[in-house]
Amino acid sequence: MSSVGKCVVVRTQWPPLSRVFTTIAATRQITAAEQRTSEPKPVSEVPGPRVYPLLGCLPSIIFDKSFSSNKLHLYFKKMIEIHGPIIKLTAPFTLPMICITNPYDAENLVRATMDASLRQGFDSLKMIRLQTADSYFEGKTGIMTENGEEWWRVRSRVQPFMMRVKEVVAYLPVMDQISLEFMDRIASLQSQFGEMPSDFLNEMYKWALESVGSVALNRRLGCLDPNIAPDSEPIRLIRLVNQLFTSLTEVEFGPHLWKVFPTPAFRKLKKTHQEFLEIADKNIRETEAALLAQEPSDDRELTLMEGLLLKPGLSRKDVVTLILDMLFAGVDTTSHTLSFVMYLLARHPEVQIKVQEEIDTVLGDHEGPLTHHHLAKLHYLKAVVKESMRLLPTVMGIARTLDKELVISGYLIPKGVCNIHLIINHTVLSFTKVIIVSPKTAMVSDGSYHANGFGRITFPSSEGVPAGALDERQAPGSHSSLLLISLRRWHQDVRRSTHRGTGDVHLPLGGRGTSSFQRANCTTSLLVMSTATRRMMVSVLWRPPALSRGFATTAATHQVAAAEQRISEPKPVYEVPGPRVFPFLGTLPSMIFDKTFRVNAPHLYLLKMMKTYGPIFKFVLPFMPPAVVVANPYDTEALVRATMNNPVRDGFESYKKIRRDAADNYFENKTGLLTENGEEWWRVRSRVQPLMMRIKEVVAYLPVMDQITLDFMDRIASLQSQFGEMPSDFQNELYKWALESIGSVTLNRRLGCLDPNIAPDSEPLRLIKLVNQLFTSLNDAEFSAHIWMYFPTPAFKKLQKTHQEFLEIADKNIRETEAALLAQEPSDDRELTLMEGLLLKPGLSRKDVVTLMLDMIFGGIDTTSNSLGFVLYLLARNSEVQTRLQEEVDTVLGDHKGPLTPHHLANLHYLKAVVKESMRLYPTFLGTGRTLDKELVISGYLIPKGWQVMVMGTLMGRDEAFFPRAEEFLPERWMRDRPLGPIHPFSAVPFGIGTRMCIGRRIAEQEMYIFLTRVMQRFTVDYKYEDLEIMCRLMFSSASPLKFSFTERR
Ligand code: HEM
């Protein structure tokens, strides 16, 4: 607690221009997250270049100055600068494209397409394979082009061979040898030409084909022979692969007329593919023959091809097609990537020296082949690869086609309709962004960017996922195991090159054969490739977090593990870590006998559990559905999506029972928003939501709330002059303010709570006491054995009695309001009050309205006042923050004398940041929960239907992984430019989650904003005592007296 007391100020600065882009995306995402609670906008509103009839955006694209078919990324860059991070592009005969450029949307997309990962965009290749003579491909076109069941049939069988480190490591020696030979080739070229020749990229292609060939075909192809003939098969293969990429781009990015008749570009692609197929097929046959000719031996490990051929469920043609795809995707990708790495090293000699030093340290005097032990230690080298791929990624973006509609950045992107998919289907592209050059950032980014692992999309098809893949859909040959192999090779190459000393290298890269790179001083070449996907990066690059980062990185590490698990079967729920589960008693004994456990402070125990078990752990209490607790935004988001349509929240069973059993069936068998689930909950929620959540409706109560707060300021001044500080029951004064405020909305009148002479047994004060008591009794009933389900325990009877008294007073007041409203003269000018609006709403009965009012009074007193107690405390303890807040209030209000206006509130940005930051450190509730109506995989575990998933915002808020300097009070972190880094929208959820988040949120926020504005306008708050103790009885409150001092500012 004491660290919170430290006074910390972070000055908000304009972000460097390079960061503005990221920030826009993040801000936009927050807005998008907020929008999710309201109606999403139609896809037609997604911004983008002008759309022409029939031609779509095509004219806007091709007549744009920045457009060049060889530099498409420049056009996209411009579009994103103009239209923002989500844009729509349409062209005739192609799918409309929604291009997304921020990690949040990418993550969103990954989750939505996890089970059906449809990638379109190779339709021409698919068509060609389907039309191949003699049905060569037997109607199955391979994992690059297939989708759905057929894709999964092959992918699921191939994956273990290509993605497991163990399998890939088997090729380390041969790759090492290939790299050694290539180093000799470089040395020879260097001495021959004094630099690399202008077709050096071609040399790299040879190296890449030799490497991928050693895996796919299990033999050396001889590409590195200096006398290899230009018309030899390997060299022709390389040319054909280059040509395939060029033709495929032309065919796929141009109008899809080839779907109607074979255009010249299509015919060229077909011819190239046929030639490629013939050579590759011949080589595959040769390998097969050689393997068959070998003596059987038990000692020998199976080669990749053998393993695949023996795999049940894969035909020989499946294997051949996969190997074709490996050869196709394994040449240009890795060699281009490595060229970029070399270029960047050449341009950053200090980085190059550091890599060399690391290599020298790790390899020492080692002479033999590289081992994976060496690779594991080359941390900086891995950071260099990451950083290079961030800056100069190999692939511009990747696409998924939606099989169901999806809200992205607040837009509803419709799902594809198969038979007319050319027009209606929507593809979502994830693009790369380029930010800063520094391998240091790549290293740091493991720690600082993992607030959203999707932040570093360098190879967008895969980098998107937190240390995982964009999804299950990466091509294993081209983008996965091969890349791992390449990555490993890299280290070897580095070593060799380092050992050979330094020389000038001219890298003629960028366009085929054109020399756009300049002469630079670098070590002899670093020939490595790596379009490595994050998934592969995980296996190679991920290190356990440094101890110093301990808690901070638990979540991220966990997330990485979770992402890895997604590629295999999810683990059963009983493997979720957690304290010992006893028969009948579940984890209860482990909890109550734990040193940290205190009835009034369960958060301390939960915090310990998170430190012990990570951000997902089991929590099984008798009489309650078994639960897993999650404390990371990724699982939270997954939960929100999975429960969007049916957000079941259990945990108020006692309350529900009391309402069900109420005398004379008062509640007509319907127990209200807080306690109902399913259809009945939605019946009420859907009708109430527009009236309670729309700013327009809530703003109508601004003047009365403002007046109440002004009255309360006078009360504070009077208490201050009377006692020299606030009395020890100041919390009670805050309750009065809160009831007066929420009463003005629900009951549409002033209750007189702020009258200094109000009698202790007056109705308002009794209401306050009853609500306090309700929370305590509810806590006792719910967090004890649910024996009250069978007979009324004392705790239950107390709750029942309290609820009955509360009901009587509230009901009486509601009746009085109703009567007063009825007595009013009808008038056209008058806006309807909330109660009137609700009473007139079709589909809501009078009892529904009464029940809601009860819940609003119940939910509207302790919540806002406890939260404000914490804000005041944090302001008192952080005087710079308080000063800055006062300055903002002074600037926004100026000399304004009248009531606050919506315009004022809209401009109080820092004030809102203060509230958010305070609720992060001191949330009102521990968290919330959802009971699953279908099974759900989170963090790699299959959580069965019927289990509860509890989202612990309290724990997330204090996790360095999501909030750097988590223990400090730094409202600046929430400001628009996010000076402390992006914030995952699901890492702070004080008002709950998804479609069932707090329905009083807007009202509560408005109340709190008004309160703080008026306090800061008039007073400076101070707190002269020990650090505040907090307690938690269903909700957090202060255990210490809130004896603030308020000094008049003027
Ligand atoms: C600082 C103030 C408040 C906080 C932090 C807060 C927090 C919450 C949370 C966490 C939930 C559970 C949401 C979920 O399960 O995802 C909730 C639900 C609810 N809150 Fe609030 N609340 C606040 C103020 C209010 C106020 C002022 C009202 C009344 C106007 C209110 C009425 C309700 C109701 C009726 C629900 C149940 C909604 C449903 O299940 O559909 N809350 N609140």
Image: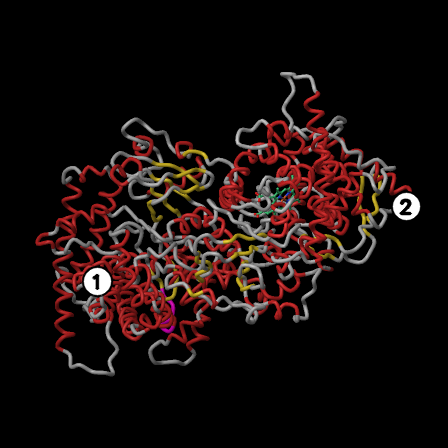
**Looking at the image, is mark 2 or mark 1 nearer the viewer?**
2
Label 2 sits on what residue type? Phe
Mark 1 lies on a secondary structure that is: helix
Q: Quadrant of the C terminus?
A: top right
Label 1 sits on what residue type? Ile
Q: Which mark is residue 323?
A: 1
Asked if ligand 1 lies within 8 A of label 2, the reply is no
- Decide which of 386, 258 is in the foreground and name it: 258
Residue 332 drawn above or below residue 17: below
Can the viewer see residue 812? yes
Q: Which residue is mark 2?
A: 723
Residue 832 drawn above or below residue 760: above
10 Å crowding of disc 1: few (<14), some (14-19), many (20+): many
Q: Which residue appears at 27% of the width and 64% of the height?
A: 157
Indicate the position of residue 897 as horizontal and vertical percent values.
Answer: 77, 27
10 Å crowding of disc 2: few (<14), some (14-19), many (20+): few
Residue 193 drawn above or below residue 994: below
Image quarter where ligand 1 lies: top right
Residue 214 drawn above or below residue 122: below
Residue 346: image quadrant is bottom left
Query: What's the CA distance linking mark 2 and mark 1?
Result: 84 Å
Indicate the position of residue 315 as horizontal and vertical percent values.
Answer: 18, 63
Which residues are drawn in magenta? Answer: 499-503
Can the viewer see residue 335? no
Mark 2 lies on a secondary structure that is: helix
